[in-house]
Image (tube, helix red, strand yellow):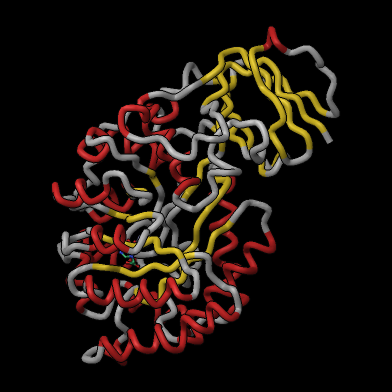
């Protein structure tokens, strides 16, 4: 089945297959072709170029994209889409003056979601999660990572990971699963964090590996949660099972998690609301992608990741949603891109690079996703007629998407 998109007002993010990520000053460049065509065979991009170069205009389906912009789908490399219930009461508590930390200390926060999840059966969890996944696909997400971490018992963590597996089997977009057993210390282990870490290392990890339920390992390396030493111990053990780290660091405090991630060859270090000069130095010339989550900063009123400091130091940066019931009840990557421009002073070019190719890199997916490249999967956003791609973050409250395509098929 062939599809030919013609008269595309502007085709964004044209890359060679060798370009796996974009860093530093290069993030300001977004290669494009105006008045373009794009040819798709089955699920793959096979050719593209200026309309003047279109020699064969035959295809099973021809789509006229006059006035419309086409870009690769968003690659959301950090979500917690599988959860049970919501936490709108904590949202109101924060409005009334409580902090995220105070709510967590009262048994709210992650432990609140864990209790709900443990009480929820697997089918209900799947159904609640699939509604959210379908919503974000409509919003242009074409590749996504999903974490466990609201189970906090062996049984409930495996339940979450099985739900992620079922989502992978049900939907055509690529989904990467991350085991985040070390998201918080459950109340049964309140005064015995080491006991919980032992449970993760000696019981959960082997089972997750045996059933091939995860691609990545994660830990919340943060004051009051897990220390740098805990992080190193877990990641070292996880490496023996082949799990690649993608870790939560520097959300509230900088305690050395970035260095620990880099030491353990983390694919990404995520959050980074608080970043020291040393963290920046440590990340230089490494394989580790820094990931910013601006919707989280927006929702719980914490600092935004200092994108300018990171990019101007020559580092790459990816953008993701952090979709979760506590700090970010939104998986809308369009809002993430807009917020990165408005609040983090990223240019539209930088934000689009961060939300596509660099997001794909942060999931080990940039061989097949994240750019318009011959041989990559045809995962696309086709906008409504808009004046320019700058309009996408500018019109932050509007839905600018006309159609989305996953693996060569229109799904809206
Ligand atoms: N910070 C850790 N984990 C989630 C939030 C967890 C929650 O509050 O439910 C995050 O990435 O923001
Ligand atoms: Zn998170």
Question: Quarter holding the N terminus?
Answer: top right
Q: Position of residue 98 (x, y in %)?
A: 17, 66
Q: Quadrant of residue 48?
A: top right
Identify which residue, 240 or 389, lies in the foreground. Answer: 240
The answer to whether 92 appears left or right of 147 in the picture is left
Q: Where is residue 388 in the image (x, y as percent from the top left)?
A: 47, 18
Can residue 48 be seen in this snapshot?
yes
Can residue 356 be seen in this snapshot?
no
> Residue at image x 63%, y 51%?
173
Q: Where is residue 335 in the image (x, y as percent from the top left)?
A: 40, 41
30 up-or-down from 92: above or below? above
237 up-or-down from 139: above or below? below
The answer to whether 410 appears left or right of 244 in the picture is right
387 up-or-down from 161: above or below? above
Instruction: Give the quadrant of ligand 2.
Output: bottom left
- How many numbered circles are shown? 0
Question: Quarter holding the C terminus?
Answer: top right
Identify which residue, 277 or 179, lies in the foreground. Answer: 277
> Residue at image x 40%, y 23%?
29
> Residue at image x 39%, y 56%?
322
Q: Position of residue 58 (x, y in %)?
A: 85, 20
Identify which residue, 18 or 61, lies in the foreground. Answer: 18
The answer to whether 232 appears left or right of 395 in the picture is left
């Amino acid at each position: 089945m062939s599809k030919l998109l013609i008269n595309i007002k502007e085709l964004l993010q044209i890359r060679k297959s060798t370009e796996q990520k974009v860093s530093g000053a290069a993030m300001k460049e977004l290669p494009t072709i105006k008045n373009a065509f794009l040819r798709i065979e089955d699920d793959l991009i096979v050719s593209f170029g200026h309309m003047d170069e279109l020699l064969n205009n035959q295809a099973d389906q021809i789509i006229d994209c006059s006035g419309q912009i086409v870009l690769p789908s968003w690659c959301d490399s950090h979500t917690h889409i599988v959860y049970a219930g919501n936490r709108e009461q904590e949202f109101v508590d924060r409005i009334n003056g409580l902090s995220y930390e105070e709510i967590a200390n009262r048994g709210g926060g992650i432990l609140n979601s864990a209790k709900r999840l443990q009480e929820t059966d697997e089918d209900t969890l799947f159904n609640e999660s699939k509604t959210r996944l379908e919503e974000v696909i409509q919003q242009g997400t074409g590749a996504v990572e999903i974490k466990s971490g609201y189970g906090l018992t062996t049984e409930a963590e495996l339940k979450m990971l099985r739900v992620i597996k079922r989502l992978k089997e049900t939907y055509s977009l690529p989904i990467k699963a991350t085991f985040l057993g070390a998201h918080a210390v459950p109340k049964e282990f309140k005064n015995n964090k080491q006991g919980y870490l032992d449970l993760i290392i000696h019981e959960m990890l082997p089972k997750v590996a045996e059933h091939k339920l995860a691609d990545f390992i994660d830990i919340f390396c943060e004051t009051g949660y897990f220390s740098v030493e805990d992080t190193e111990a877990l990641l070292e053990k996880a490496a023996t099972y082949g799990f690649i780290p993608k870790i939560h660091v520097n959300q509230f405090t900088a305690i050395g998690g970035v260095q620990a991630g880099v030491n353990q060859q983390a694919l990404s270090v995520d959050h980074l609301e608080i970043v020291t000069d040393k963290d920046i130095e440590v990340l230089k010339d490494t394989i580790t992608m820094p990931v910013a989550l601006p919707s989280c900063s927006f929702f719980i009123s914490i600092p935004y990741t200092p994108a300018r400091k990171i990019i101007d130091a020559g580092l790459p940066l990816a953008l993701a949603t952090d979709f979760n019931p506590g700090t970010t009840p939104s998986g809308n990557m369009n809002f993430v891109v807009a917020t990165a421009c408005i609040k983090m002073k990223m240019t539209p070019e930088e934000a689009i690079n961060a939300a596509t190719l660099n997001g794909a890199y942060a999931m080990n997916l940039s061989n097949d996703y994240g750019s318009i490249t011959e041989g990559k999967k045809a995962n696309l956003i086709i906008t409504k007629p808009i004046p320019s791609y700058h309009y996408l973050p500018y019109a932050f409250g509007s839905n600018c998407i006309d159609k989305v395509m996953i693996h060569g098929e229109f799904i809206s």
